[in-house]
Amino acid sequence: MGYRMASVAAPIRRRSGLGRQEAIDGYLFIAPWLVGFIVWIAGPMLFSFALIFLNWSLLTPPTFAGLSNFSTLFSDELIPVSLYNTAYYTFIFVPLHVLLALLAALALNLRIRLVGVFRTIYYLPSITPTVASAMLWLWVFNPDFGLVNLVLRRIHIHTLQWFVDPAWAKPALIIMALWSLGGAMIIFLAGLQDIPQELYEAASIDGAGYWARFWGVTLPMLSPVIFFNLVVGIIGSFQIFTTVFIISNGSGGPANSTLFLVLYLYQNGFVFFKMGYASLIAWMLFAIVLIFTGIQFLLARRWVHYEGSL
């Protein structure tokens, strides 16, 4: 009897030893990521949260500020301005960006000659360096010799001041950003090609035309992709910084019309050296993005349809 128990216990010990070795190997493999996460993400986040309650100018030792940064936030007249500019950009740019990317993907999903060339052309702006793209659009929207005003003069339409005029600075930024729709377009294209052709064939047999197939098959099957692009687009639009920094030379002008929240955060942290107040703005931005993302996930239950649930 004791011999049988020993013979059974030996494989169990070998399996448990193998499991421990696999666990050790797994932790060793993820150790670089864990160290990077702690050092470069979790650590700075905790440090920035502590800075909310401090006054620190980078040049002098930090001092305890209590809730003074919060009172400054509620009385700062530029916070509503930056929030309005960011919301204006987000709620106009993101729907247009998703719509144009979807239309481009539908066009590039057709079986036409040189479709690979057209896909490359539409995707190229997305990999163009941001600085080079911003400099190009500065010339395009130049009020004196820019390409857009040149075309408007040729067709006898009143020219615009674009980045010089507070009323047109944000629309110009939106038009500029819509140029780079390649990333969302590629995701839509992958989603379109993943739709089973049997669904279109069944709809055609039932007498559905093109628009009926689009509304009844394409959009429901693409709803997870649309949802993904909406979430990513809103998160990215709330963090717009590089292009507006180059366009306005870091000032948020003209007349604070391009003073977006991240640019104002940068100004407080690295121009005015108010690191505590800048950290509070950063956490406010984090809370706003978190709330909007949560709302999108709640609303997604009503209109996002996954293949397994159809």
Image (cartoon, grey):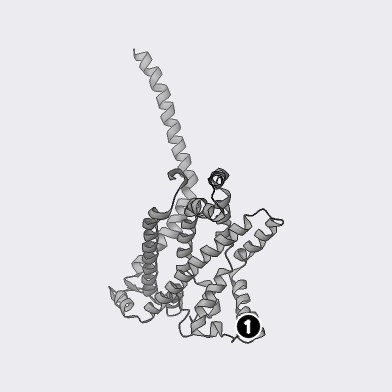
Q: Is residue 253 visible?
A: no
Residue farthest toward the right in the current orientation of the protein: 113
Residue tagged 1: 152
In this picture, is 204 found above or below 83? above
Residue farthest toward the top in the current orientation of the protein: 1
**Picture coordinates of residue 271 (x, y %)?**
46, 79
Which image quarter is the N terminus in?
top left
In this picture, is 41 found above or below 203? below
**Picture coordinates of residue 252 (x, y %)?**
48, 80
Q: Amino acid at mark 1?
A: Leu
Q: Residue at x 47, y 45 (%)?
A: 307
Picture quadrant where residue 118 is located: bottom right
Is residue 121 toward the left or the right of residue 203 in the image?
A: right
In this picture, is 289 found above or below 8? below
**Picture coordinates of residue 100 (x, y %)?**
55, 64
Query: Mark 1: which secondary structure?
Result: helix
Picture quadrant where residue 290 is located: bottom left
Is residue 58 toward the left or the right of residue 213 in the image?
A: left
In this picture, is 65 found above or below 157? above
Q: Residue at x 38, y 57 (%)?
A: 299
Picture quadrant where residue 281 is located: bottom left
Foreground pick, 299 / 6: 299
**Picture coordinates of residue 230 (x, y %)?**
47, 61
